[in-house]
Amino acid sequence: MARARKNGVGGQKANSLADKDRWLKYYRSMLLIRRFEERAGQLYGMGLIGGFCHLYIGQEAIAVGMESVKRAGDQIITGYRDHGHMLAAGMDPKEVMAELTGRAGGSSHGKGGSMHMFSVPNGFFGGHGIVGAQVSLGTGLALANSYRNDGAVSYTYFGDGAANQGQVYESFNMAELWSLPVVYVIENNQYAMGTSVERSSAETHLYRRGLSFNIPGEEVDGMDVDAVAEAGARAAEHARTKGPYILEMKTYRYRGHSMSDPAKYRPQGELEEVRKTRDPIDHLKAKLEGVGLKEEELKAIDAEVRQIVLDAAEYARTSPEPDPSELYTDVYLEAAAR
Amino acid sequence: MSVEILMPALSPTMEEGNLAKWHIKPGDKVESGQVIAEIETDKATMEVEAVDEGIVSEILVPEGSEGVKVNTPIARLGTGAANGKAPSATPEPAAAKASEPAALKAEVAAPVAKAPAKDPEIPAGTRLVKVTVRDALRDAMAEEMRRDSDVFLMGEEVAQYQGAYKVSRDLLQEFGERRVIDTPITEHGFTGLGVGAAMAGLKPIVEFMTWNFAMQAMDQLINSAAKTLYMSGGQIRCSIVFRGPNGAAARVAAQHSQDYSAWYANVPGLKVIAPYDAADAKGLLKAAIRDPNPIIFLEHELLYGQEFDVPEIEDWIVPIGKAKVRREGTSLTITAHSRMVGLALKAAEELAADGIEAEVIDLRTLRPLDHGTIVESVKKTNRLVTVEEGWGPMGVGAEVAARVVEHAFDYLDAPPLRVCQEDVPMPYAANLEAISLPSVEKIVKAAKAVCYR
Ligand SMILES: Cc1ncc(C[n+]2csc(CCOP(=O)(O)OP(=O)(O)O)c2C)c(N)n1
Ligand SMILES: [Mg+2]
């Protein structure tokens, strides 16, 4: 099933902006994710968010860097650690936070929760709770792009733990066999719940996992938003013109797996070390200061982001619960009249 | 302006904990993300990070305090004007109670299904053509693929080999390899790809060589295809048909011979169809392909070669969700689906010779189940026998009987009986296989029993 492919138009949109403007955009987006997640953690502690809640703190550079290469029509799909991708994709923080609190104003009207959110207009196809399932689904999005020959790319994210699921390799095989336009973004934060990559994986260099399918891969510093964006652009170009590509993003999750995980399985000092030396936001802040950005400018962004998050939290607390009549809606779609 | 820092819950079930350690003291400047305290429960110790920035004005609960209730203020923070609007960190009691399911009190009733549409009229003089079930299915796919370019077929051996059971004969020749796609042997993966493509708006038909192999793909069928519309609040559609032979084949033993009807019919979000004759196979498959929901379409290998009359009508569509009375009678009601309809009809003939007039209902669609037709029949006959090829416990017959008991209890003159596969894996030996399956004799026997004859 070899397919004709539209040629990529080439050139990344972010590069057309001056470094400073581009960095400011990244900075704002990454800070929004971090502040949002901190607030979500707080609302969870207050009992306003239930169940599982997987925070993205530490991994912000990945969703934000990759977003810079996304074009209209491209899709993103990920697992349950999804708040960051949604915010980066431009979903309204209010809708995202209200979904976390299970309210009518949430993006799924409160019926999906933290792990199951979607926004077709933003190209965001979820938000999936089963480890690895999004990999075949994301490859299916790419199959649709290829079927339509519309030049769109599917960015399919998954974790180091998910990288050991069988369907990932079933998908790799079909993706390369059919030259599907998909970029597999492995967010290697070094742990799957309490299990480190070393304890779960025979091949710990996850970017090599496509080798036996002839899928090229590369390791990327996932704490450096510029490195992410550059590798992302390369991968997207390859996906658009040739077929699948794997990016292994080396990153770190600061918090526990979900809210009730104290993450005691990590060696003493590991988190502190990462926070001190590799924090993606600090790293970018330093670059911005290096090009002469003034303290007040950064402060203004901080204040703006803080207000957005406060408003989102307020909305998420005050939006009503879904009406009981919503219980039976959205189970089936009505068949169109024939 | 000041905000209160509250005792956080580490897990949904935590009600109280110990404040093990403070890392801050009054007068300290605190930044978002900074570790300010350690909390412990009997299960875990965890660091508490600040969410707001500011200067610590007061520690309200001292280090070493035990049994601190969740949401108790534990410290106070003075925040600068830079923080903008007052962060309302104190939970509103109403909102915090939000986890109590209001739905329970409100007693939401399941919506009453609209009366399903009737089968299309067959105008007088319409030619009836003998067609095998295999070709009827093929014709349905070909017609829908001609009609809608978003429809495509994928599965193992569907293209070059023309289908493991030749159901996709000539489709590759007509539609080409873009729309008739041979997949590797990779059920979990290609089911996920199909669902993903459906989420992107296409209308895939995914063939399973047999439904036994769909077990590998169960997660994608249930967790992704059936549930995503709901979990997305109606945003993500999944118009897809999964089809292939289901039920007992001949002499292939337990792993290749199983009826999955009850498994899928248990799942909200799916529609489940199991036709018997060629006209229904064609009309229901066409309806399934046009339906915007995920459909489980259960065919039967032993029916593929059987010929039936199919009306020669342009766009023959049979409505989903409507049972069909295959034979009218007054003595008892027999329900069946797929290949079991044939057995039930034969049993009805034998019973008629004994003066027992069975009404035979072909369920056709298992979800949504047309219980109106069943209940009306039982109100007339007062007796019920259900027939299915699968195992009895928690099965289709159990569901049919429950609905009849619920809606026509006073009309029943005998306890309903179920005819189903014996409660064992399918044996290979010819004699054991035969006695493990439902048969005309077993149906006749059950029918006589409910008639006290
Ligand atoms: C099929 C399946 N198995 C197990 C789980 C439970 N579970 C949820 S997340 C997780 C760890 C996954 O880790 P990783 O893929 O590295 O992603 P991360 O959480 O680090 O982002 C597990 C085991 C699940 N949701 N689905
Ligand atoms: Mg991980």
Image (spheres, coloured by chain):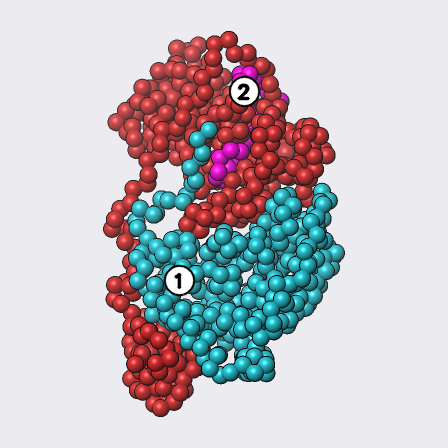
Chain colours: A cyan, B red
- Determine the residue positioned at 32% across, 84% down: B78
Res B116 → quadrant: top left
* Relative vertical location of residue A245 with respect to residue B250 in this rendering, above or below: below
* Relative vertical location of residue A116 with respect to residue B439 in this rendering, above or below: below
Query: Residue B122's mark?
Result: none
The residues colored magenta run: B289-314
Res B139 → quadrant: top right
Res B255 → quadrant: top right
Q: Is residue B251 left or right of residue B233?
A: right
The mark tally for this picture is 2
Between the residue at mark 2 and the residue at mark 1, the CA separation in whole angstroms equals: 51 Å
- Residue under label 2, please give it: B314
Q: Observer-nearest residue: B178 or B255? A: B178
Q: Position of residue A324 (x, y in %)?
A: 30, 49
- Determine the residue positioned at 36% across, 44% down: A328
Q: Position of residue B25 (x, y in %)?
A: 36, 89
Ligand 1 within 8 Å, label 2 CB: no
* Relative vertical location of residue B148 with respect to residue B362 in this rendering, above or below: below
Q: Observer-nearest residue: B87 or B197? A: B87
Instruction: Name the kind of residue labelled 1 in the image.
Output: Lys
Q: Position of residue A210 (x, y in %)?
A: 70, 59
Q: Observer-nearest residue: A124 or B17? A: A124
Q: Position of residue A126 (x, y in %)?
A: 50, 55
For the residues beneath circles 2 and 1, the answer to whether they share a chain is no
- Determine the residue positioned at 34% across, 70% down: A46
Please, what secondary structure does the residue beneath circle 1 have?
A: helix
- Residue under label 1, please give it: A94
| Tags 2 and 1 touching, CB below 8 Å | no
